[in-house]
Image: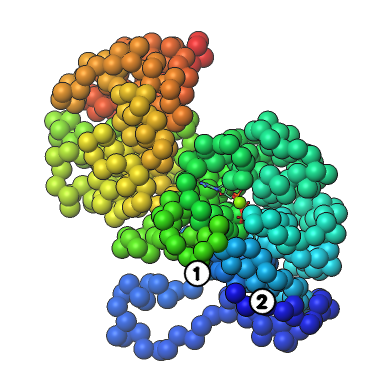
Amino acid sequence: MASVSAPSAALAPHRPSASAALLFPCPYSSPRVSPSPTAQPRRLAVAARAMPWPHVLTVAGSDSGAGAGIQADIKASAALGAYCSSVITAVTAQNTVGVQARGPCCTGGVRWGAAQVKTGMLPSAGIVKVLCENLRKFPVKALVVDPVMVSTSGDTLSGPSTLATFREELFPMADIVTPNVKEASKLLGDVSLQTISDMRSAAESIYKLGPKHVLVKGGDMPDSTDAIDVFFDGNEFIELRGLRIKTRNTHGTGCTLASCIAAELAKGATMLHAVEVAKKFVESALYHSKDLVIGNGPQGPFDHLFSLKSPLRKMGSLHKFNPDDLFLYAVTDSGMNKKWGRSIKDAVKAAIEGGATIVQLREKDTETREFLEAAKACVEICRSSGVPLLINDRIDVALACNADGVHVGQSDMPAWEVRELLGPGKIIGVSCKTPAQAEQAWKDGADYIGSGGVFPTTTKANNPTLGFEGLRAVCSASKLPVVAIGGINTGNAGSVMELGLPNLKGVAVVSALFDRECVATETRSLRSILMNACSRS
Ligand SMILES: Nc1ncnc2c1ncn2[C@@H]1O[C@H](COP(=O)(O)OP(=O)(O)OP(=O)(O)O)[C@@H](O)[C@H]1O
Ligand SMILES: Cc1ncc(CO)c(N)n1
Ligand SMILES: [Mg+2]
């Protein structure tokens, strides 16, 4: 690969200038719309209306290999539906073997308005200082700092001279800092980081430097079968555990993760949800690219735009999945609603009124058109109450109504295929009767499992009963939160929760709510039974 020589201009004065405006045109300036509305289809007219678009500004280095740096940032933001503008701090010549050359660029005079800013390679202390001065002058909505220092190939991207400025000036302004283990070690004076517990201590020490959140990334952690990152918000440590994809194509995972966090924040997600979606995105992208062959070196790039291969749009949900939402899980049944003369919508409204914490539409006998209309109405009801809405089995209906997720059984579409179709932001649940099925659900990228039937049930034909012991075995083995299902009602729900099983977050009920005269009343009494049982166990 040809090497890139360092640009001669080191640091320009950091004053807004006409040339800077030309170099970095404001993405917010409105385009001219030609005045010919008559022939415009309605859908296009709606799309043309002015709306604030999620916007990430990346301040990072260019990677000529296009797997990391600015190039990764633009592709990752685009893949998650955010606009990405860029300030190039350095130019590097890289390929799949390593970094052949690097040189700094000018960062002066950039106005970034109110975007979410993601920083990557900042090659000198001078550039970090210019950046900090700009950040103080033009406050931003969120600042994601990826403290890039050494590439995975072992080449230095930002020398030790930047360490103090990172720690003292940049980190205190950051909403999140995302070092990998090597960078965390360097930031803390070359401490050794070998275990998850070391990563926790590192996250805590970096938090003390002033950022609001820290994510210590474990992609480069040796001897780990899972890819584990440690998140710290000043109170709680959260271990984010993903599947480690066996591939050489991991160049740029860190840059991608940080840009995805910024893109999700720009879309309105909370920090933890943004990090979770970003991690799932990286995992999916690596999985799709595991067999890509680009270049001959030991570390290849991956395909950020893998989702373009699917004709379906993957709109992430802004509704972060909270395992506690499984507490009182209401599952509808078309036969029961018909029997009691209720619409699906009225049934859902009543369950929410009574305190259901999550709703699943399980409409085995409803015509597709009618189901979709009802699902759209239920999405509105659920959104306005902050209750997630899932669709049983019908991925097409879930996509069409933009539900929060899908629940699948062992004979439905495999959860990993569902994840492909729905993208990283949606909730996926899988019915599991055995520890092996629970393990597979986790590997497939599910968010929770439903386990049962705990008691004999008439709602589902040919459904063997697991009993408490079967449920205990699944709960103990599961890496995912569990909701118990099958024959649960106001008479026995308390005994299920009182088992105090690990990972058991709640109960799912069908006939106990919907095969009754007043859905709201039944839901209310089930809720108080569950609350009492939890306070006892
Ligand atoms: N093989 C893998 N399979 C799944 N996830 C991975 C893998 N490698 C890294 N990750 C994930 O990718 C994200 C980025 O972490 P990583 O530690 O690789 O960052 P990094 O070293 O800064 O990356 P780079 O320097 O290559 O851009 C983390 O969430 C990590 O867990
Ligand atoms: C320009 C650039 N930024 C970041 C990284 C870290 O992956 C890289 N290799 N190159
Ligand atoms: Mg890495």
* Numbered mark located on residue 3 in the image: 2
Q: Amino acid at mark 1?
A: Met
Of 519 and 285, nearer the camera is 285
Q: Amino acid at mark 2?
A: Ser
Ligand 2 shows up in the quarter that is bottom right
Q: Which mark is first along the chain, 2 or 1? A: 2
* Rendering coords of residue 42 (x, y %): 31, 74
Label 2 CA crowd tier, 10 Å (few <14, some 14–19, many 20+): few
Q: Residue at the spot x=48%, y=19% of the render?
A: 502
Please give left or right for residue 406 compared with residue 154 in the image.
Answer: left
Q: Residue at the spot x=49%, y=60% of the render?
A: 302
Label 1 CA crowd tier, 10 Å (few <14, some 14–19, many 20+): few
* Rendering coords of residue 329 (x, y %): 36, 30
Residue at the front extreme?
A: 296
Residue at the bottom extreme?
A: 35
Indicate whether 153 appears above or below 280.
Answer: below
Of badges 1 and 2, the one in the foreground is 2
Indicate whether 103 appears above or below 129.
Answer: below
Q: CA distance from mark 1 to mark 2?
A: 42 Å
* Rendering coords of residue 10 (x, y %): 81, 77
* Numbered mark located on residue 51 in the image: 1
Please give left or right for residue 393 compared with residue 8 in the image.
Answer: left
Of 122 and 468, nearer the camera is 122
> Helix, strand, or loop for circle 1?
loop
* Rendering coords of residue 492 (x, y %): 33, 12
Q: Quadrant of residue 96?
A: bottom right
Please give left or right for residue 400 compared with residue 501 in the image.
Answer: left
Q: Do the numbered discs 1 and 2 sit on residues whose CB atoms are within 8 Å?
A: no
> Helix, strand, or loop for circle 2?
loop
